[in-house]
Amino acid sequence: MPHPEPKPDDLFLTRRELLCRSGMGVASLGLGAILGSLGLTGQVRGGSTRLISPFASRAPHFPGKAKHVIHLFMNGGPSHVDTFDPKPSLAKLAGKMLPVENLRTERKTGAAFPSPFKFEKMGQSGIEVSELFRHVGESIDEIAVIRSMHADVPNHEPSLLLLNCGEARLIRPSMGSWVTYGLGSDNQNLPGFIAMCPGGYPIQESQNWQSAFLPSVYQGTYIDTQHTDVEKLIENVRNNYVGLKEQREQIDLLQALNEQHREQRQRDAELEARIQSFELAYRMQLEAMDAFDVSREPQHILDMYGPGTQARQILIARRLIERGVRFVQVWHGSGQPWDNHDDLEVNHRNLAKQCDQAIGALLKDLKQRGLLEETLVIWGGEFGRTPTVELPTPGANAGKINGRDHNHWGFTTWLAGGGVQGGQVYGATDEFGFQAVEQKVHVHDLQATILHALGFDHEKLTYRYAGRDFRLTDVSGHVVHELLA
């Protein structure tokens, strides 16, 4: 396309433009070194440098065994004493007040509430697993069960943000954003970080997968997996009017115009992300149609994962990891959360039925494909639930006495694959399951351990913003080396 003749006015700058360009020019000298250290610049003919894809695969601080992450997030707080932390003492004190000092909960709670579910020792390790997760229990020797997790407060909103973003109140980048910022992605035709949540956003909405002050390209891409049609899963994934060749020509023209626009605005980060999204959207047309279409799986794989939305999105998670996506978060319980203040026996059984078979299948499927050793699988919620029954509260549990309250003092999370030493239980809550008492693991410790499995020193994976260095673990966190092989 011919360029227009230059105008004399183009040779002059206003005072504001001169100061702005000069100031940004000095800053760009340091920016070049930073981008180079991150592997975001490349040599072009003539020895000059150019900006390459922000998702270009990059090496971590040290060789990590995990290359990808699947985060199975049980929204609402599943009960640890009904899933992976059996407490027979509750049966002995059923209907009686617990002899626990400083029993502090969000609401007034009552007497001991024994689990209505049976536990069974499974695998060679003999770890006890609830009947709710028998399929998961079949792979218990691949799993490290952390029974001593604890968070800061018993409320959903801050606990969700603490677990996902490392900070309960202020805007901070999510774990998936930190990971893709540090490692990039192995597939340039799909987003590096995908969050799948059927039926709409959870509490705190997109803040759970936000990039905050990190470049916007590292924000999670939300997929509403209630849809089975790929063209509904991802809006406008296919252009029914223009072919790929014509689209490529349009994109090239658009990118050239955008490049001029970007240069005039000192390469604004949000503008950069928007421009990158155009290119990614074009490349996704073929790759996404394949990755999200589970009908392309053989029937025995579909049968192994089972029916339903949860089974489908967990199978999609495996397909995404298989194609090089770095971080996949799978939400369960956005419509009907694990937040069972009443009817816990019925609700927990229904929720587990939706995902147990598929999670068990995921672990086996990853292993048989040789992907488990490089894929870190995380299971858990933002907190656990009390070992006591919750008393009737107006507007909370409809006058019923058959549920549990929030409990951030002690709960369970488990890890598998990706350098995890499976077949072990780490830490413990007290004999009733109220609070962590042995080898306590704070949420920041969990995050530090996850980053270590990926090859990062959590204290060095930082981003300078507003005059200070920020990191996922804030100013705390210790790696739990015992959890890693």
Image (cartoon, helix red, strand yellow):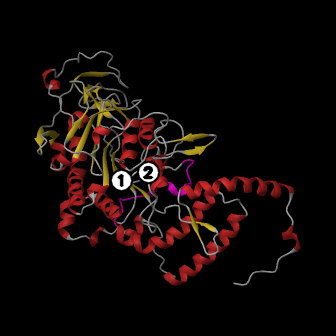
Left or right, 448 with reference to 397: right
The one nearer the camera, 418 or 49, is 49
Is disc 2 in contact with disc 1, using a CB cutoff of under 8 Å?
yes
Left or right, 9 with reference to 241: right
Instruction: Find disc 1 in the rendering and name its residue.
Output: 69
Instruction: Find disc 2 in the rendering and name its residue.
Output: 176
Task: Tell me, yes or no, if residue 43 can be seen here.
Answer: yes
Identify the mark nearer the N-term, 2 or 1. 1
Left or right, 106 with reference to 221: left
- The picture places residue 413, in percent across and down from the top left corner, at 29, 40
Mark 2, Cα crowd under 10 Å, few <14 / some 14-19 / many 20+, is many
Q: Which residues are magenta?
A: 212-228
Residue 192 falls in image quadrant: bottom left
Residue 112 falls in image quadrant: top left
- The picture places residue 480, in percent across and down from the top left corner, at 33, 37
- The picture places residue 430, in percent across and down from the top left corner, at 24, 24
Residue at the image point whose x is 59% and y is 77% from the top? 252
Type of the residue with mark 2: Gly
Task: Tell me, yes or no, if residue 83 can be seen here.
Answer: no
The one nearer the camera, 471 or 92, is 471
Residue at the image point whose x is 70% and y is 59% from the top? 266
Where's the C terminus, which quadrant? top left
Where's the N terminus, which quadrant? bottom right
Helix, strand or loop at disc 2?
Answer: helix
Magenta portion: prevailing SS class: loop
Residue 397 falls in image quadrant: top left
